[in-house]
Image (cartoon, rainbow, N blue to C red):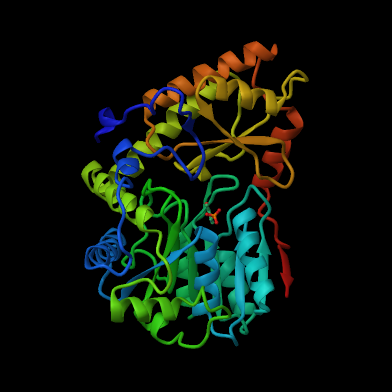
Amino acid sequence: MTTGRILPPPSGEPCLLTPGPLTTAHSVKEAMLRDWGSWDGDFRAMTARLRRELLQIAEDDGSLDCVPMQGSGTFCVEAMLGSLIPHDGRTLVLSNGAYGQRMAAILARMGRAHVVLDKGDYLPPRGAQVAQILARDTTITDVAVVHCETSSGILNPLREISDAARAAGRRLWIDSMSAFGALPLTPAEITFEGFVSSANKCIEGVPGFGFVIARKEALARARGNAHSLSLDLHDQWDYMNRTGQWRFTPPTHVVAAFLRALKLHREEGGVKARAARYAHNRDVLVAGMRALGFETLLSEAWLSPIIVTFFAPAHPAFDFQRFYDLMKQQGFIIYPGKLTRANSFRIGCIGQVDAHVMRQVTRAAAEALAAMGVPSGAPSPEALQERKRLSDCERSEEQISTH
Ligand SMILES: *Cc1c(COP(=O)(O)O)cnc(C)c1O
């Protein structure tokens, strides 16, 4: 691990403890200080390299291809679902947070048949349940799941879900936005049709495009299937393969920055090393916050090395906006909660940050609590009880809704 190489952002620039955009290396920002012609051979070579290197990270067995797409990550999720799931498909969306809900909203907006298994905020969809649903409902053709649900930080059990889908002969689509590059996702381990990630998450680039890594067969059979011209993944793939170019204006500087980020990813030691750094960040963060009385939303088993949700302290003097401002004054941008029920906030473990930074973060949190007159970060007993109740019960009657 080369954590010693991580430099703090220049003074005045806050450290982003958010799940993208995140704190990037200076050399990544520096890579954007020139211009490229989108049709020029130099840039076409950059696009080819980007696709090749991403396929290497995915440990492509020859069955996959990589299609970058302009826009934020959601554009890519929409491009994948809309282009690659056939019109007569019916998709089971496994939802346990905002990004699962977003996939369902995308399918709803496109008028595509789908079913939602809603696990709330605390629980992962388990393989056995997925198998049960697929056995019961033979009209389901596809399954969609979020790898790391960034709204809580929960790490979903991809392997058992993929096993269930494969055993039942259904296609699997994965939103691996906040996981790819730091958590393994390879065809040798996980059977999937396609997955999505973006430039500004675990590869540590700047925002501006996402990419779909999908089976070539799925891309090939998708001609004319997309609901949208600009988000037609088949067209983008086909055109890129024929011309080496993006169909419409590419985010040239973002691609240049991304190639630099890929180089840093490789030099750090690839997925394994990045996973280890992020996990260490999380461990230092969680230990430091617990020492202040804070508690995590999720039980240990489901905590991801990507982002951690903490319950808001119960003390009446705690005010999130004030806490946020006090953290910012000390150089750290944290993230509000994104839960439907519990009052919470999030701290990301990804980006150019290391254990040293995480220790500073917990010191800053201690300062912020002291400034607010909050003696402890402890959540309310009710919040903890709710967590216990929900994680204890593997409810037999799941909330399944059909659309
Ligand atoms: C970041 C993220 C997205 C995409 O969000 P955008 O704001 O569109 O970039 C989708 N899914 C997950 C799990 C994410 O973390």
Q: Say whether residue 356 is visible.
A: yes
Q: Position of residue 281 (x, y in %)?
A: 41, 32
Q: Is residue 108 above or below residue 225?
A: above
Q: Is residue 398 above or below residue 81?
A: above
| Left or right of residue 234: residue 240 | left
Q: Position of residue 113 (x, y in %)?
A: 66, 79
Q: Residue at the location (46% across, 85% down)?
A: 222
Q: Residue at the location (37% across, 23% down)?
A: 356
Q: Position of residue 341 (x, y in %)?
A: 74, 44
| Left or right of residue 59: residue 8 | right
The answer to which of 175 and 71 lies nearer the viewer is 71
In which quarter of the view is residue 383 placed?
A: top right
Q: Is residue 146 above or below residue 312?
A: below
In which quarter of the view is residue 319 placed?
A: top right
Q: Residue at the location (53% across, 81% down)?
A: 226
In which quarter of the view is residue 166 placed?
A: bottom left
Name the quadrant of the N terminus: top left
Q: Position of residue 220 (x, y in %)?
A: 39, 85
Q: Count the labels in the image.
A: 0
Q: Say whether residue 127 is visible.
A: no
Q: Residue at the location (72% across, 21% down)?
A: 318
The answer to which of 267 and 136 lies nearer the viewer is 267
Name the quadrant of the C terminus: bottom right
